[in-house]
Each structure stands twice: as structure tokens, then as C-alpha cells.
């Protein structure tokens, strides 16, 4: 009887080890972050009109889930404003992001992968009054709490 119990314990231990439940380090490496190449440029609207400010797109890297994206505008004084992401319930606050093109409203998609025309974003001033005249603003894109893109955009 003791031999059967010992054999049962041995087989259970082997099963747990082979399933990865025990015996590992518990520190499996995280997947490498996907690198993105962002394009940030002045929108065609005049900055004084408090309307369209910046166009955003990217042409390298995988699509990004909107619930993990934060887009901040940082003015010349270092003050940061977080923009509302596209979609229902997001259009609140002084800075909005509107999504154009693409095939999935839950993701910001790679411009090169969404043909024809690609996917791009408009960042719009909805009351923040970032600039009363030509100026430069910093656009910072954070994904899953990591800054994945930041650049200065000159607005005219």
C-alpha cells in the first residue's frame, strides 16, 4: 500500500513539473516591446482657431489597444494635458483625439497596414487654448505605462 502511495506522489510531482507548475524560476522574461516609428506634424488648421492641432500616425510596429494609450500635450511652460481617446464616452476635456481610417475602432493601427489611405489621428484643442499664436508643443504617447513616442511639433 505504501508503494502505491509513493508511486502516486511521484507521478503527481512529475505531472506538476512537466506542466510548469513547480520547478521554474517564476521569472519568465517579458516579451520585447514593439518599437513604433511615429509621425507627428502640424494640422492644416491655424493654431489660433483652437481646432485641429496635430496629425499623428505610425508606420512601424503593431497596432495598439486604445485602453492602454495615453496622449499628452505639453506646453512651453511644462504643463501637461491628457487628451481624450477616440470612441464613445472619451470625447471629454480640453483635448480630443479623433481616429480616421483603419479597420478596428478599438485599436490604433499601423498606417502602412491599413490601406487604402491608412489610419491617422487628429489631436484637437477643445478649450485648452494651447497657443494663441505660432508655438511649439511636445506630444507624448504612452502605451501600457511606457513612453513609446515623444516629439516637439511646431504649430503655425
Image: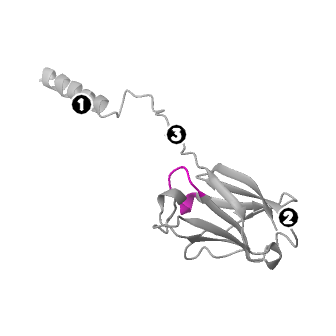
Residue range (magenta): 58-68
As drawn, the residue found furthest toward the front would be 116
Residue 18 in sight:
yes
Label 1 sits on residue: 12
Residue 110 in sight:
no
Q: Identify the residue at image location x=54%, y=43%.
A: 33
Residue 51 vs residue 74, the one in the foreground: 51
Mark with earlier residue (1, 2)? 1
Label 3 sits on residue: 32
What is the CA distance from the residue labelled 3 to the residue labelled 2?
A: 36 Å
What is the CA distance from the residue labelled 1 to the residue labelled 2?
A: 68 Å
Instruction: Please tell me whether residue 30 belongs to the stretch shown in magenta.
Output: no
Q: Identify the residue at image location x=48%, y=66%.
A: 116
What is the CA distance from the residue labelled 3 to the residue labelled 1?
A: 34 Å
Percent across and percent down for residue 120 are 59, 65
Label 2 sits on residue: 135
Q: Dot 1 surroundings within 10 Å: few (below 14), some, or many (20 or more)?
A: few
Can you say whether 146 is above or below 137 in the image?
A: above
Residue 19 vs residue 103, the one in the foreground: 103
Camera-nearest label, 3 or 2: 2
Horizontal side of 150 relative to 77 (left or right) equals left
Percent across and percent down for residue 43 are 72, 69
Q: How is the image coloured?
A: one colour
Helix, strand or loop for disc 3: loop
Q: Dot 2 surroundings within 10 Å: few (below 14), some, or many (20 or more)?
A: some
Residue 109 vs residue 95, the one in the foreground: 109
Quarter placement of the N terminus: top left
Number of numbered callouts drawn: 3
CB within 8 Å, label 3 to label 1: no
Horizontal side of 8 relative to 104 (left or right) equals left
CB within 8 Å, label 3 to label 2: no
Amino acid at each position: 500500500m505504501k508503494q502505491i502511495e509513493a508511486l502516486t506522489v511521484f507521478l503527481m510531482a512529475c505531472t506538476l513539473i512537466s506542466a510548469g507548475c513547480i520547478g521554474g524560476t517564476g521569472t519568465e522574461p517579458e516579451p520585447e516591446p514593439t518599437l513604433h516609428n511615429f509621425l507627428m506634424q502640424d494640422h492644416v488648421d491655424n493654431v489660433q482657431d483652437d481646432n485641429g492641432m496635430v496629425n499623428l500616425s505610425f508606420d512601424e510596429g503593431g497596432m495598439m489597444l486604445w485602453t492602454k494609450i495615453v496622449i499628452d500635450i505639453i506646453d512651453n511652460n511644462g504643463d501637461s494635458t491628457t487628451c481624450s481617446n477616440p470612441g464613445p464616452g472619451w470625447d471629454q476635456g480640453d483635448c480630443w483625439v479623433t481616429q480616421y481610417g483603419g479597420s478596428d475602432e478599438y485599436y490604433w493601427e499601423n498606417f502602412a497596414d491599413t490601406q487604402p489611405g491608412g489610419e491617422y489621428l487628429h489631436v484637437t484643442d477643445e478649450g485648452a487654448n494651447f497657443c494663441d499664436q505660432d508655438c511649439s508643443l511636445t506630444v507624448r504617447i504612452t502605451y501600457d505605462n511606457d513612453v513609446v513616442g515623444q516629439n516637439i511639433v511646431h504649430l503655425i
